Image (cartoon, rainbow, N blue to C red):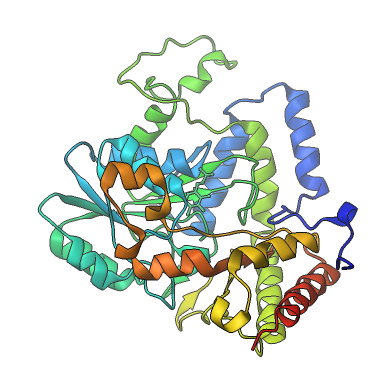
Amino acid sequence: MQPIRSKDNFLVFGAPLIEEDEIAEVVHCLKTGWLGTGPKVAKFEENFKKYKQASYSVALNSCTAALHLSLIAAGIGPGDEIITTPLTFCATINAIIHSGATPVLADVDPESMNIDPEQIASKITSKTKAILPVHFAGRPCEMEAIMDLAEKFDLMVIEDCAHAIESEYKGTPCGTFGDFGCFSFYVTKNVVTGEGGMVLTQKEEYAARIKVLALHGMSSDAWRRFSDEGYKHYLVTEAGFKYNMMDLQAAIGLHQLKRVEENWLKRQSIWHTYNKALENLPLTLPADPEPETRHGYHLYTILIDEEKTGITRDEFLKAMHGHNIGTGVHYLSIPEHPYYQKRFGWEPEDYPHAMRIGRQTVSLPLSAKLSEQDVQDVILAVKTILTKAGAN
Ligand SMILES: *Cc1c(COP(=O)(O)O)cnc(C)c1O
């Protein structure tokens, strides 16, 4: 079989689009010698906050750190229950575990693939302290219903916005509904800094606490202690972590953020191209964005149902790889993993929608870096594989 792309032209899934401005800014950063947390981080925090119309922002070294510190700043700990989705990256669950709280799963809606507010309602107990929705693939969760539940039961809301930088729900940016919004700038995400994350919050005291927690628990702005303002003593006020973002990372993010809308438009266009090219195949394509929402177009997820395609999801993944096209799986549902099964007694069958999606889903490349030829190669590969499988 002749692969659609050659091996030395392998299409890497989620490859970021890095341009000259980022490179020059990183070089500038290296030349100044100020690599750690400093003025570029402060500027990135400011620009990101403005873009999201938020009150306070703290840059960190990952979204995982953002989730962890949000939970701590929310006063969440042992004995508390946090309701979240089974269709997410393990980081969401691990952050809850590391806060000392207990994650509780509420199944997703099979169409939107987002946490189902009715399922959330059915999982609320006297121990529930927060809802942690994930705007899956960039599609906003049903925030009205979620905020209603939060109000009614006096719960905190921590939004996992790792996919949702550009997302909005009824005119409000995702990440500004709840008490905390947590973002990722990991290499495959919509804005990248290599590794990186950000917390948005509406309360100054939360932002201040997160800043302290992110740098060993040292009193405020300890990163200034080696600056030209003269040596400053720091005092440790609690046992914190090492979660701060570096200027080297912010140097990349500053320019990435400038092109966030431009790149969003590119991904939207690729999304529409896929929709049109794949519509007559026996696949389930992603649901259209809901009215009055803005989808972040982070992931384009198709479902492979063996009964319709004649090929299993894993065989499909392998065949795409055979054509030298990288794909993703977002995600095997959380209860599929042995650690969580053992620790919480979770079984995939108890979250049937997330289980089915996790076993059928394939994410096609959807990066602003893709050329028109790349997109056509992906489409041709999908069609070729399904035809060969005798899809009916
Ligand atoms: C990527 C991701 C995270 C973790 O982000 P990091 O910045 O890598 O820590 C958390 N939640 C979801 C849904 C993600 O996709």
Position in image of residue 261 (x %, y %): 65, 65
State the residue in front, 173 or 116.
116
Say if 228 sits above or below 285 in the image.
above
User: Taking 212 as reference, is 166 left or right?
Assistant: right
Say if 339 sits above or below 314 in the image.
above
Position in image of residue 390 (x %, y %): 70, 84
Work out which residue is located at the far left of the displayed protein and give it: 126
Residue 320, quarter of the rendered image: bottom right
Position in image of residue 158 (x %, y %): 34, 52
Number of marks in the rendered image: 0
State the residue in front, 184 or 88.
88
Residue at 60%, 39% in the rendered image: 195
Say if 52 sits above or below 98 in the image.
below
Residue at 34%, 51% in the rendered image: 202
Quadrant (top left, top right, bottom left, bottom right) of the N terminus: bottom right
Position in image of residue 361 (x %, y %): 55, 68
State the residue in front, 227 or 321.
321
Quadrant (top left, top right, bottom left, bottom right) of the C terminus: bottom right
Say if 32 sits above or below 371 in the image.
above
User: Taking 107 as reference, is 1 left or right?
Assistant: right
Residue at 45%, 81% in the rendered image: 292
Residue 145, quarter of the rendered image: bottom left
Residue 9, quarter of the rendered image: bottom right
Can residue 140 be seen?
no
Can residue 225 be seen?
yes
